Image (cartoon, helix red, strand yellow):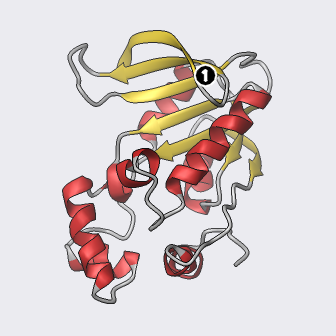
């Protein structure tokens, strides 16, 4: 994997440089680094590792908190000169089609973890090696990780990247995602304080 292209993108949250990483220049779904103005890799960098969630990030689905987390993280990163790594691993690594099948199972009473395992997948099949590669390519040695997920913290701690702190990113629950968030907290160990 290597840096394939980059461009400046002004957004509602602030001005960023968007960098695409992939094995090939014709890759249609590259991983992305969203780098804020004022980014300085010589100091601990606020970093959000965000896995793609088309339903939440693009369509504003209220089944999850992903889109709201993405928006809040971009604002925080713009303010603090940080980086967002956008990994193309939809549905905790099971892909969009299987995620939609999992949604149907959830509508029949299974929780998000049970739905994934019912379909033959791990509860969370995401990998973070690509994020570590991108962070290293950007010259980042120390991060303040913006996450509620202890698995992300552990994944980075097993890498050359030093985690010097964790910044919580808790989105208040609403009726449509309360059960989902409770499952994340109770079964997956997410630090949500619900």
185 is higher (above) or lower (below) than 167: below
Number of marks present in the image shown: 1
Residue 139: percent from left, percent from top: 62, 18
Packing grade of label 1 (10 A; few <14, some 14-19, many >=20) is many
Q: Quadrant of residue 154?
A: bottom right
Q: Residue placed at 55% from the left, 59% from the top? A: 151
Would residue 38 be found to the left or right of residue 106 on screen? right
82 is higher (above) or lower (below) than 24: below
Q: Residue placed at 20% from the left, 73% from the top? A: 119
Residue 64: percent from left, percent from top: 48, 64
Looking at the image, which is closer to me, 54 or 147?
A: 54
Q: Residue placed at 57% from the left, 82% from the top? A: 186
Looking at the image, which is closer to me, 156 or 147?
A: 147
Looking at the image, which is closer to me, 105 or 116?
A: 105
Q: Residue furthest bottom?
A: 109
Would residue 144 be found to the left or right of residue 67 on screen? right
Residue 143 seen from this side: no
Which quadrant is the C terminus positioned in?
bottom right
Task: Identify the residue position indicated by label 1 in the image.
Answer: 35
Q: Residue placed at 27% from the left, 21% from the top? A: 23
Residue 183: percent from left, percent from top: 51, 79
Tag 1 secondary structure: strand
Residue 67 seen from this side: yes
Which quadrant is the N terminus positioned in?
top left
Q: Quadrant of residue 118?
A: bottom left
Residue 71: percent from left, percent from top: 60, 43
129 is higher (above) or lower (below) than 176: above
Would residue 170 be found to the left or right of residue 70 on screen? right
């Amino acid at each position: 994997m290597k840096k394939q292209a980059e461009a400046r993108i002004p957004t509602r949250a602030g001005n960023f440089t968007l960098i695409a990483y992939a094995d090939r220049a014709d890759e249609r779904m590259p991983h992305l680094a969203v780098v804020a103005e004022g980014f300085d890799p010589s100091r601990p960098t606020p970093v959000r590792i965000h896995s793609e969630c088309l339903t939440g990030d693009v369509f504003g689905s209220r089944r999850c908190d992903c889109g709201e987390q993405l928006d809040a993280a971009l604002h925080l990163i713009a303010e603090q000169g940080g980086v967002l790594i956008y990994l193309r691993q939809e549905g905790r690594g099971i892909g969009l089609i299987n995620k939609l099948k999992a949604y149907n199972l959830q509508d029949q009473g299974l929780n998000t973890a049970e739905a994934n395992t019912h379909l033959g997948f791990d509860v969370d099949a995401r990998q973070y090696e690509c994020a570590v590669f991108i962070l290293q390519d950007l010259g980042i040695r120390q991060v303040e990780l913006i996450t509620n997920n202890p698995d992300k913290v552990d994944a980075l701690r097993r890498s050359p990247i030093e985690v010097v702190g964790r910044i919580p990113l808790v989105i208040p629950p609403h009726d449509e995602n309360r059960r989902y968030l409770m499952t994340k907290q109770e079964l997956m160990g997410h630090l949500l304080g619900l």
